[in-house]
Amino acid sequence: MSNNISKKIKTGTLRLRVFAGPNGSGKSTIIKGIQDARVKGRKLDLGTYINADDIAQLIFKNKFTFEKYDLNVSKKAILFFASNSGLISEEFSETMLESMFNIKKNEVILKHSQHFQNLAQIIARFLREKMLENRKRFSFETVFSHPSNIDIMRRAKEAGYKVYLYFVSTEDPEINKFRVKFRITQKGHAVPEEKIATRYYRSLELLYDAAELAHQCYFFDNSINDETYRLINHFKMRESEKVWDTKRKSGFTNWFKKYYWDKMK
C-alpha cells in the first residue's frame, strides 16, 4: 500500500454515506436533516451525492451532464457497464437501452422517454463505481433491496473508506404504500404496490449485513404520520467494538428488534 493511500485511510478522509430504506419510508427527509445538521459548527461533507430519482428528472429534461461529476463518459462506456450491472432484463434489454439515448459533449440526450428511469438507475450505479474507483467521497440514496448495495459498501470499506449507514423504516409496508400514494398527489414518482411490499422486506433482510460494514450506523423510525422521524439507536465502531448511544429496549421498534438486534445474539 502506498504512503498516500495509507495516509488517507489513517486520517479517515475517505467517506461513503449510504441513505437507505424502503420506498416511502422518508429517506429524503432524513437526507435533508443530515444536510442541514452541523457537527462542531460545520456542515457534514456528503461528497458527491448520487440519487437515481434526481438523475431521472434531469435526463427526462435533457439536462443531465457528467461534467458535474468531473467525468468524461461515452455511450460505449455506459453500455459496457450496463451489460455487467445486473440491471438488464427481458423487460429492459441491452437493445432497448442502446436505442434510447446518446451522449454528446458529456450530456445524455434521450431519443424517447420510455424506460428513462431504468437508464437513470444504470447511470447512478455507474457513478457510484466511478467515485469509488477515483477514491472520492460520495453518498447515495437507495431503497436497499438489492445485494449490490452491500457489495459496494464492502468494497469501499476494503479500499479504506469509513462507511456510514443511515437506515430508515416504518413498522408496516402498508404505511409505505399510503405515503407513496400521497407522494403521487404531490407530483412524486409512482411505485407499484407489490414492489413496495417486496422491497420493504428485502431491504430489512439486508439491514444486518449492511450495518456490520458500517463505521457508524444510524437507525431511524418514521412510522407515525405527521410526526418527525426519530433516531432509535446509533453505534460507532471503536477498536473493533460497537459503542452504542443507548441500549434501552423501550425505544426499540419491532422491525429494528427483528431485523437487527435479535440477529446480534
Image (cartoon, rainbow, N blue to C red):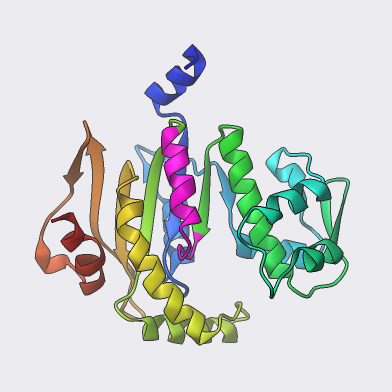
Residue 214 magenta-drawn? no
Can the viewer see residue 44?
A: no
- Up-down: is 209 above or below 259? above
- Up-down: is 27 above or below 197? above
Q: Nearer the viewer, residue 244 or 81?
A: 81
Q: Residue at x 54, y 41 (%)?
A: 47
Q: Residue at x 24, y 47 (%)?
A: 235
- Up-down: is 29 above or below 135? below
Can the viewer see residue 258?
A: yes
Where residue 101 sits, quadrant-wise, is bottom right
Where residue 263 sits, quadrant-wise, is bottom left
Q: Nearer the viewer, residue 28 or 108?
A: 108
Q: Residue at x 71, y 71 (%)?
A: 92
- Magenta stretch bounds: 142-158
Residue 164 place in picture, x, y as percent: 38, 46
Looking at the image, residue 96 sits to the left or right of residue 12; the answer is: right
Residue 24 place in picture, x, y as percent: 46, 75
Residue 57 place in picture, x, y as percent: 70, 66
Q: Nearer the viewer, residue 11 or 118?
A: 118
Q: Quadrant of the C terminus?
A: bottom left
Q: Secondary structure of the magenta portion, mostly?
A: helix
Count of labels in the image: 0
- Up-down: is 205 above or below 154? below
Residue 147 magenta-drawn? yes
Residue 40 place in picture, x, y as percent: 34, 37
Q: Residue at x 24, y 66 (%)?
A: 256
